[in-house]
Image: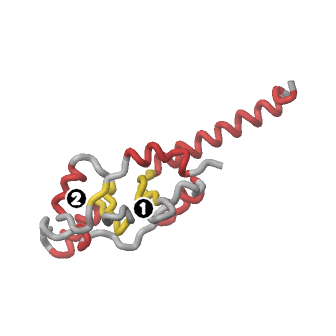
Amino acid sequence: MVLVEQILDRAKARLVKISPDAPVLDAATLFRDGAEMVLACRESGRLAGIITKSDLMRSFVQSGRLDLAVPVASVMQKEIVSCEPADKLEQVWQVLSQNSFRHLPVEDQNGCAIGVVNARDILGGLLREAESEEELLKEYVMGVGYR
């Protein structure tokens, strides 16, 4: 059983935060610089929302223009689906699959953002677990486990 905490180092490296009050231009700049998902966090560190490149495009299409001075809070997703370090990777993979997500924020027990996992991290963790189980079974069948 592999948990999110076992891939948390990579998730922490991918964490990009912004204030919900910051202008959308700041979020767009973060995307230009390589961010895949930006987490809107309050001063306390608690997650307030999520903004993706798709959110910016949706805002642009709906209004016919993108006002880069409006606050991130006006375009961010406020319904947050997240995971915690103690969650099993199998469960997180199901959440990603069912919602067609590629990334998922990781929150601590206090609701503070501590990372962003992606599908590749999760699949890599699940693959390593399967390979480990396969090796244990081979050793058992070959009798290595009894020597």
Residue 94 percent location from the top left of the image: 55, 60
Identity of the amino acid at label 1? Cys
Q: Which badge, 2 or 1, comes first in the chain's sequence?
A: 2
Q: Is residue 146 above or below residue 12?
A: above
Q: Residue at x 27, y 47 (%)?
A: 34
* Nearer to the camera, 81 or 45: 45
Residue 102 visible, this angle: no
Q: Are marks 2 and 1 in contact (CB under 8 Å)?
A: no
Q: Which residue is mark 2?
A: 27
On-image quarter of the C terminus = top right
Dot 1: element: loop
Can you name the residue that lies furthest to the front here? 44
| Label 2: which secondary element | helix
- The single residue placed furthest to the bottom in the displayed view is 63
Disc 1 packing (10 Å; few <14; some 14–19; many ≥20): some
**Count the marks: how many?**
2
